[in-house]
Image: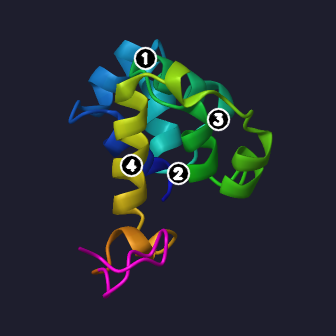
Amino acid sequence: MDAITWVRTVGEGDSDRQIAVRAGIPIGTFSRQLSQNLLTPHNIVLIARAYRASPLDGLVAVGLITKAEVRSAALTVNMEDIPDEDIVRLILQRILDKDIHPGLTEPLDDTNQATGTPKT
C-alpha cells in the first residue's frame, strides 16, 4: 500500500478537498503531498484522527515503519477490553491481506487446522 491508496481507503470516498478540510490540512499542501505520493507523518496522523483510523497503518503505508515494528510495539491486552468494531475490523483486514494470512482464505481440509481434529 502507498500513501494514495491509504488515503483513498481511509477517506471513505471523500474527495481530496473534503479529506484535507476534514483533517485540517491546507488544501494546497495536501494536494502537493498526495501528487508526490508522500504524506508527512504529521498529516498522516491528522487524517487518521479525522477518520478514526489507525495512524500506524498510514505510517506503514508510506514506508516509515514496518508492520513488524507495529506488532512488536503492541501491548498484550485483554480481548474483553477490545470493542467489537475493532475486532471485526482486524478480521476483515486479515481476510483482505491474503498474502500474510492465507489460512483465512483457503478452504479447510479434512481436519480442523486449529486443533488437528477431524471435522464433524
SS at circle 3: loop
| Circle 2: residue type | Gln
The spot of residue 119 in percent (x, y) is 29, 76
Residue at image position (35%, 80%) is 118
What separation in Å lies between label 3 and label 2 (alpha carbons)?
Answer: 11 Å
Marks 1 and 2 sit apart, C-alpha to C-alpha, by 22 Å
Q: Amino acid at mark 1?
A: Ala
Q: Residue at x 38, y 75 (%)?
A: 112
13 or 31, which lies in front?
A: 13
Q: Nearer the viewer, mark 2 or mark 4?
A: 4
Instruction: Place residue 43 in its image quadrant.
Output: top right
| Left or right for 5, reference 32 | left
What is the distance, in whole Å, between disc 3 and disc 4 at their CAs? 28 Å
Instruction: Single out the mark in the foreground, 3 or 4.
Output: 4
* Residue that badge 1 annotates: 50
Residue under circle 2? 36
| Nearest to the observer: residue 38 or residue 90 | 90
Instruction: Using the image, tell me which numbered label, if any, was put on residue 91.
Output: 4
Stretch in magenta: 108-120
Can residue 109 be found in the magenta stretch? yes
Question: Callout 1 environment at 10 Å: few (<14), some (14 to 19), or many (20+)?
Answer: some
Using the numbered discs, state the Cα–Cα distance from disc 3 to disc 1 in whole angstroms: 15 Å
- N-term-proximal mark, 1 vs 4: 1
Label 3 sits on residue: 40
